[in-house]
Image (tube, grey):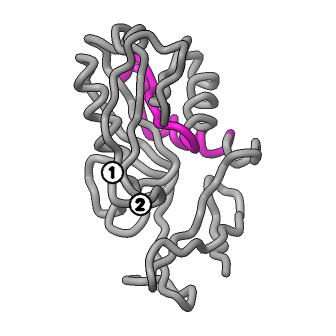
Amino acid sequence: MKYTMKIAGLERDLPLCQIADDLYIAAFICFGDAEITTACAEELLKLVSRDDYDYIFTAEAKGIPLAHEMARLSKAEKYFVARKGAKNYMPDPISVEDHSITTKGAQKLYLGRDDAEMIKGKRILLVDDVISTGGSLRAMEEMVNMCGGTVTGRVCVLAEGDAAKRQDIKFIGTIPLFNGKGEPIGT
């Protein structure tokens, strides 16, 4: 099953993936699709003012190409990535717990103390590919707060399900949830 939609002016077929007995999501994956990544980054930058943030912040993994391309296009010198595991190169990492709809169970996000120090006192724009329940977004915001930064904006490519009703997120498009027959739920 698939769901065909236009995203940032480009048509894509999104595979439907089961996440519960009778609940499916359309998987938007920009990895390997340079055209959609660039188009989405351009559209996301139209939703925010470069004067409103110092750094872009995302969580591993699917937000990375978007954050990278947004930083490149806006000529930002640096962006930050909360990793799904502590790395040897991270000095004294901090962590927060993340509950995402697409990950079974809880996971932790990590950031090195050196990056945390750079975030302190700075205005941060959170970037994600899709926001559904907001679990990853909450974890990123908690991490920014732990670092002493201030979240000044939240953007994503697609708002899924009830996330489309949120007033604190800017997004390019919306995407429904689906039942076991591949039919949109609640539309």
Q: Residue at x 66, y 73 (%)?
A: 4
- The amino acid beneath tag 2 is Ile
Expressed as whole percent of the image width and height from the top left, the position of residue 54 reads: 39, 16
Expressed as whole percent of the image width and height from the top left, the position of residue 95 reads: 34, 29
First to last magenta residue range: 38-63
Is residue 52 among the parts visible in the rendering? Answer: no
Q: Residue at x 70, y 58 (%)?
A: 10
As drawn, 6 above or below 29: below
Task: Name the mark on residue 101.
Answer: 2
Pointer 2: residues within 10 angstroms few (<14), some, or many (20+)? some
Q: CA distance from mark 1 to mark 2?
A: 8 Å
Expressed as whole percent of the image width and height from the top left, the position of residue 88 reads: 54, 16
As drawn, 47 above or below 57: below
- Whether the magenta-drawn stretch holds residue 56 is answered as yes
As drawn, 78 above or below 109: above
Disc 1 + disc 2, Cβ < 8 Å: yes
- Mark 1: secondary structure: helix
User: Where the N terminus falls, by quadrant?
Assistant: bottom right
Is residue 128 among the parts visible in the rendering? Answer: yes
Q: Is 30 placed left or right of 186 in the picture? A: right
- Whether the magenta-drawn stretch holds residue 138 is answered as no
Task: Name the mark on residue 135.
Answer: 1
**Which comes before the other along the chain, label 1 or label 2?**
2
User: Where the C terminus falls, by quadrant?
Assistant: bottom left
Q: Quadrant of residue 123?
A: top left
As drawn, 34 above or below 105: above
Q: Is 51 placed left or right of 27 in the picture? A: left
Expressed as whole percent of the image width and height from the top left, the position of residue 121 reads: 26, 11
